[in-house]
Image: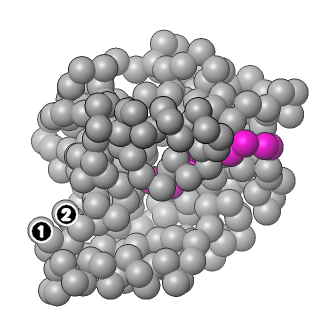
Amino acid sequence: MGLETARVLAGHGARVILAGRSQTKLDEAFADLRADRPDARLDTLVLDLGSLASIAAAASRLAATETIDLLFNNAGVMNVPDRHTTADGFELTVGTNHLGHFALTAGLLPALRRAEAARVVTVSAIAATWRGGRLDDLMSEQRYGAMSAYAKSKRASVVFTQELARRLAGTTITAVVVHPGSALTNLQRHSQGLMARIVIAMTRNIVMGSPEGAAWPSLYAATSRDVASGGFYGPAGRDQTSGTPKSVALPRGADDPATGVRLWTESERLTGVRFAI
């Protein structure tokens, strides 16, 4: 989805900085986009959202000189069978999908402030509405479940965006959150077992859209004049799996200010990161 988002933006003249953990993969993405858009203005940046040191190094490099109009918090880890941790000891899914984006956004605030009207677009998922997405035991230390950790991380993305929007009120930065519907991408690479393979094979042509379609809500949130800070946007089709982007209902309780403050405070404690707002 990130690649397709970058393809559309580059095709419309935006300068795009591709960020990823591997320079080899970044070079492949760079070549893919250049083959499609020979005049694309592209740069690459090695960034591992599972490492606070990598985030700090990448953010400081950009914050020093760049002006960022659009920040896409797009990384996603899903359905990791067993509990693993990041370089900093965080549960891998929440550590990457939420805490990594939390730290990156904080580090890039100077570059976002230089823009006349910047937007932070954080990619969540419909899983944010699942009951397993409760934010207590954020690091899944008491009990780990692959999909509950994913749901937890994506609910955290929504709650984080609500609190970020409140804290950025009155500034030139808009914070929005999206969910892309369903699409068959590399996100499913951890799905294991015969049943998982059967389900994916059966549903890919029924409920799963394309990566291009899944990028649509992010692009809408980044460019539409109708977007409001704190808004949640997703596809309008059946069961919100695909279709034209629209404003969708927040998960129950995700806009509760007390919940937002608790998650923000815990995220600061874990990462040691502070937002200069």
Location of residue 132 by image quarter: top right
Mark 2 crowd level (few <14, some 14–19, many ≥20, 10 Å Cα): some
Quick check: 139 left or right of 168? right
Location of residue 111 by image quarter: bottom left
Question: What residue lies at 59% left-to-right and 15% top-to-bottom?
Answer: 131
Q: Is residue 185 above or below residue 13?
A: above
Please name which of the two marks, 2 or 1, marks the residue nearer to the observer: 2
Pick the front one: 150 or 61: 150
Q: How is the image coloured?
A: one colour
Q: Are marks 2 and 1 in contact (CB under 8 Å)?
A: yes
Task: Work out how far the residue at label 2 is from the one at label 1, CA to CA, in angstroms.
Answer: 6 Å
Mark 2 lies on a secondary structure that is: helix
Q: Taking the image as drawn, is residue 95 in sight?
A: yes
Mark 1 lies on a secondary structure that is: loop
Q: Type of residue at label 1?
A: His
Mark 1 crowd level (few <14, some 14–19, many ≥20, 10 Å Cα): few
Q: Position of residue 46 (x, y in %)?
A: 55, 78
Quick check: 106 left or right of 137? left
Range of magenta residues: 74-83
Q: Principal SS element in the magenta part?
A: loop
Q: Position of residue 148 (x, y in %)?
A: 66, 28
Quadrant of the frame with the N terminus: bottom left
Q: Is residue 206 above or below residue 109?
A: above
Q: Which residue is mark 1?
A: 12
Q: Which residue is mark 2?
A: 8
Asked whether residue 77 is drawn in magenta, I would say yes
Q: Type of residue at label 2?
A: Val
